[in-house]
Image (tube, rainbow, N blue to C red):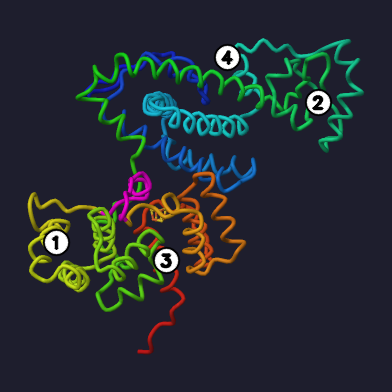
Amino acid sequence: MEVIRSQKRTVSNDVVSTPTLPLYLTAPPMEVRLEEFELFAIDRLRVLKGVSDGLARGRNPNEMDDLVETLWREHMRLSDVSEMINKDIISHFVLRLVYCRSDELKKWFLSMETALFRHRFRRKKIEEQRAIVGEFGLPYKAVIGAELESLKERLGLVARSLGQSDVENIYYKVPFEEVPDLVAGRRVLLQKGYAFVAGSQLVSLVVTQFRSHLSKALILTNRKWTTTIREREKDRLTPIVEALSTSYLGPDYSQSSEYADISLKDIDQVSKSSFPLCMRHLFEKLREDHHLKHGGRMQLGLFLKGVGLKLDDALAFWREEFTKKVGSERFDKEYAYAIRHNYGKEGKRTDYTPYACSKIITSAPGAGDHHGCPYRHFSEDNLKAALSRMGLSSRGMEDVMDKVRNKHYQLACTLTFEAVYGASCDTGINHPNQYFEESQKILKSKTPAAPV
Ligand code: SF4
């Protein structure tokens, strides 16, 4: 792929004729506009993040099929089929570049792309599935004639143990190590080192191939990235590629809304009812110590701005606490400027936006700092104590801790939200201000309207 500034993209006919589920075996000979390079990748990232969320929530295969279809329709579908295929291919290869850069990134991308492929494949008609097997060049032969007859009785036993009434029409003979999930689930007949895979189980064969191909491709891409592309593209593509893996894809919460409009007099009560754990912790520490270090002041200060605290109220709020510790003169000299700065009233007059979870989770609080994400940065005991203060039952707490141990911090926060408010949050928590607004929506819908 060659990335160009901006003009009509040229595409080879080969790409347009690719089946609707590409295998991404080689980068296609096409030109990509710079803006598409980033926008297509962001759309695919939204799909992969949705897949990751669905898997972490333990959705079953049929639910995952539906989820993938919905995500694809929302973010990747275009009315022109050939344009949609191109978007699919371009976005995959861009993200390959983004996610080849460390083992952790590679692992995540490999798992999510494989899951995406699996569930898209499962939705294809049998003819298209066979075409994909052919395109992979898989050397599996259908078992026919006398060999099939000789196996029918034992194939029937396997089929019935899986709840099917009879053997299928087509079986493939495959080295057993290529279908580990079917062997582990006792869903195939094994004989002399071969597994006999029913046509309806083709997905397992193809997904194993897909994963192995992508895994090798990521290693090669990493080599190209570090030896040539990173340096050659340092002024153009490299900054986009480096930003994409940590990019936050939702609203920036820079404007106050119907559900983000707090004033000084409500702040203590609202902090208990609607702040996510990261902000609750900072708020409590500020009230306790009358001080927060820089990272904490930024994280909490911008959050409060995003939930609608006006500049005058923000100055009064920080002044009330800090003057107890540093005195009024020092507060005016050292701290008030930074608060006005965050509201775009000083310096370059940039209107700074509140931090998203991805930024908070990847921050590195040092000794004496209270910023960061408690699900990531608290010890297990401290986190459990904090969750218990939020009213979580021991069952709810175990569910949350399970996600934390598996490093699904935002999902742990989502489960906390669902336990606290007794309502589901299907989009997952991606931003502390989103947590706040969702919580206010629920609480306000439960409050009876005041009599007229
Ligand atoms: S997941 Fe996000 S909102 Fe929740 S505590 Fe962590 S940073 Fe805050």
**Residue type at mark 3?**
Ser
- Label 4, on which residue? 135
Point out the tag, 1 or 4, that comes first from the N-terminus.
4
- Label 2, on which residue? 168
Local packing at callout 4 (Cα closer than 10 Å; few below 14, some 14-19, many 20+) is: few
Tell me, for residue 335, which label it has, or none: 1
In magenta, the rendered stretch is 354-369
Q: Are marks 3 and 2 in contact (CB under 8 Å)?
A: no
Tell me, for residue 439, which label it has, or none: 3
Is residue 392 visible in this depiction of the protein? yes
Whether the residue carrying mark 1 lies under 8 Å from ligand 1 is answered with no
Is residue 82 visible in this depiction of the protein? no
Q: CA distance from mark 2 to mark 1?
A: 74 Å
**Residue type at mark 2?**
Glu
Comparing labels 3 and 2, the label whose residue is closer to the camera:
3
Secondary structure found at label 3? helix
Point out the tag, 3 or 1, that comes first from the N-terminus.
1
Whether the residue carrying mark 2 lies under 8 Å from ligand 1 is answered with no
Q: CA distance from mark 2 to mark 4?
A: 23 Å
52 or 355: nearer the eye? 355
Q: Position of residue 222 (x, y in %)?
A: 39, 19
Vertical position of residue 166 compared to residue 57: above or below:
above
Quarter location, residue 332: bottom left
Residue name at image x 69 percent, y 23 percent = 179
Q: CA distance from mark 1 to mark 4?
A: 64 Å
Comparing labels 3 and 1, the label whose residue is closer to the camera:
1
**Residue type at mark 4?**
Glu
Residue 364 within the magenta-colored segment of the rendering: yes
